[in-house]
Amino acid sequence: MTKKQRYDAVLQWFEQNMPIAESELVFHNEYELLVAVMLSAQCTDKRVNMVTPKLFEQYPTPQALAQASEQEIFQIIRSISYPNAKAKHLKGMAEKLISDYQGQVPNTVEALQTLPGVGRKTANVVCAVAWNQPTMAVDTHIFRVSERIGLTTHSKNPLQTEKQLIQYIPQHLIPKAHHWLLLHGRYICQARKPKCEQCGIKEWCASAEE
């Protein structure tokens, strides 16, 4: 099986069996999405969704968040992983949105990465989810699953995985493919004990062939 054949088969299966694939984070606009994605780093979406309602109620805009103290933000997000750093980054992000972007979330990966606490993965997620751009965010699930299935080979870091994936996935499918692979890794192709008996793509999986 060639790599292209594997991609074609896997993507076709996902298209047929998971036509709707969306973020599990709860948000209502680009600002809320950016905040939620920043909080989700090394934390579950479920935990983030428990915290953000109160955060958005108290700080519904970048202007409101920028006026909050780091300690006030910390008190709301304290159950999230790395709350001190994230409180600092959220305040800094809001301040920069106001000073540099008229309070609007920028819609390019490059501009998003100028915001405190926003790396390439977060920027890619926001661009894909908010504006359906062909950006592939690579988290631990996607990094693991792509290599295990055989969509990527010998990736040493997320950027290498990202470049291999976007080389083979049609541009219009990239935003959805991010969710396909993420959710597959979260619920089926789990790290310690993959549920191969429940896997719909195992006949094209490189690890299953071994």
Image: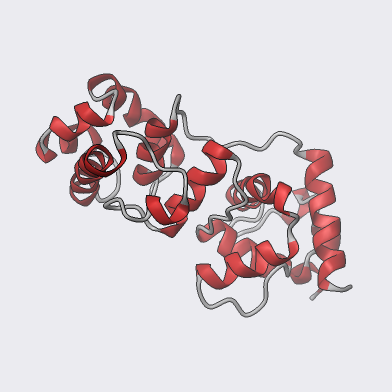
Return the residue nearer the eye: 98 or 162: 98
Q: Where is residue 104 in the image (x, y as percent from the top left)?
A: 35, 34
Q: Name the foreground residue: 190 vs 113.
A: 113
Query: Furthest residue to the top?
Result: 57
User: Residue 167 is drawn in which quadrant?
Assistant: bottom right
Q: Of residues 16 and 137, which is closer to you in this image?
A: 137
- Give the left or right position of residue 71, taking residue 62 as reference: left
Q: In this view, does 142 lie to the left or right of 84?
A: right
- Residue placed at 58% from the left, 58% from the top? 142
- Residue 35 in percent (x, y) is at 35, 38
Which percent across, then down, holds residue 121? 46, 56
Residue displayed at 80% across by 43% down: 15
Q: How many marks?
A: 0
Return the residue nearer the eye: 156 or 205: 156
Q: Quadrant of the C terminus?
A: bottom right
- Looking at the image, residue 112 lies above or below residue 156: above
User: Can the viewer see residue 42 in this picture?
Assistant: no
* Residue ID at (63%, 46%): 175
x then y, percent, for residue 42: 38, 53
Q: Is residue 91 left or right of residue 19?
A: left
Residue 179 in sight in this render: yes
For the point 56% across and 45% down, the residue is: 128
